Amino acid sequence: MTWKRVVLEIGMGTDIRGRDCTKAAVRALRDALWHNSLSAANALGLDVDSMRVEVTIGVPRPDEVDTDAVLAVLPHGTGTVNVVEGGLEILNDEGPDGTLIASAAALVRLDLP
């Protein structure tokens, strides 16, 4: 059997005032996952926890993302997180505050013949 890509989900998350990369990353993955109900595993007679999910997060400061917090969002299966430079940060006119936007991609694989 071979691990085959069956789904690609994408999402966006923000931290409007705190510029928190982890908060925006978690919201981006939730956005990607919570708009879908995957029935592929069940339709193929597989356990939903047999899915492998490869998560890629894009944020301005990748080293600030708590990958365990991002993985905790996954409702089924096992996962990995790769954080890359990306997203968007818009600073406020006054002070150090601003808005941070993260992008997420969740690639789902199943072990198929």
Image: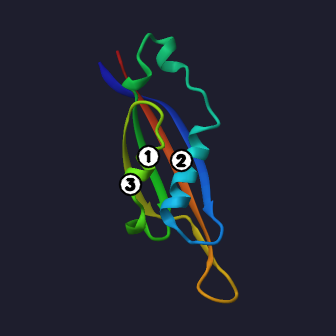
The crowding category of the residue bearing disc 3, from other C-alpha atoms within 10 Å (few below 14, some 14 to 19, many at least 20), is: some
In contact (CB < 8 Å): disc 3 and disc 2:
no
Could you say whether the residue bearing mark 3 is in a helix, strand or loop? helix
In the rendered structure, the answer to whether residue 54 lies left or right of residue 106 reads left
Expressed as whole percent of the image width and height from the top left, the position of residue 57 reads 47, 55
Q: Quadrant of the C terminus?
A: top left
Dividing the picture into quadrants, the one containing residue 100 is bottom right
Q: Which mark is residue 17?
A: none
In the rendered structure, the answer to whether residue 105 lies left or right of residue 83 reads right
Q: Which mark is residue 67?
A: 3
Q: Residue at position x 53%, y 47% from top? A: 29
Q: Which mark is residue 55?
A: 1
The crowding category of the residue bearing disc 2, from other C-alpha atoms within 10 Å (few below 14, some 14 to 19, many at least 20), is: many
Expressed as whole percent of the image width and height from the top left, the position of residue 68 reads 37, 51
Nearer-N-terminus badge (1/3) = 1
In the rendered structure, the answer to whether residue 53 lies left or right of residue 37 reads left
Nearer-N-terminus badge (1/2) = 2
The crowding category of the residue bearing disc 1, from other C-alpha atoms within 10 Å (few below 14, some 14 to 19, many at least 20), is: many
Q: Which mark is residue 29?
A: 2
Which residue type carries mark 2?
Leu
Nearer-N-terminus badge (3/2) = 2
Can you say whether 93 is above or below 99 in the image?
A: below
Which residue type carries mark 1?
Val
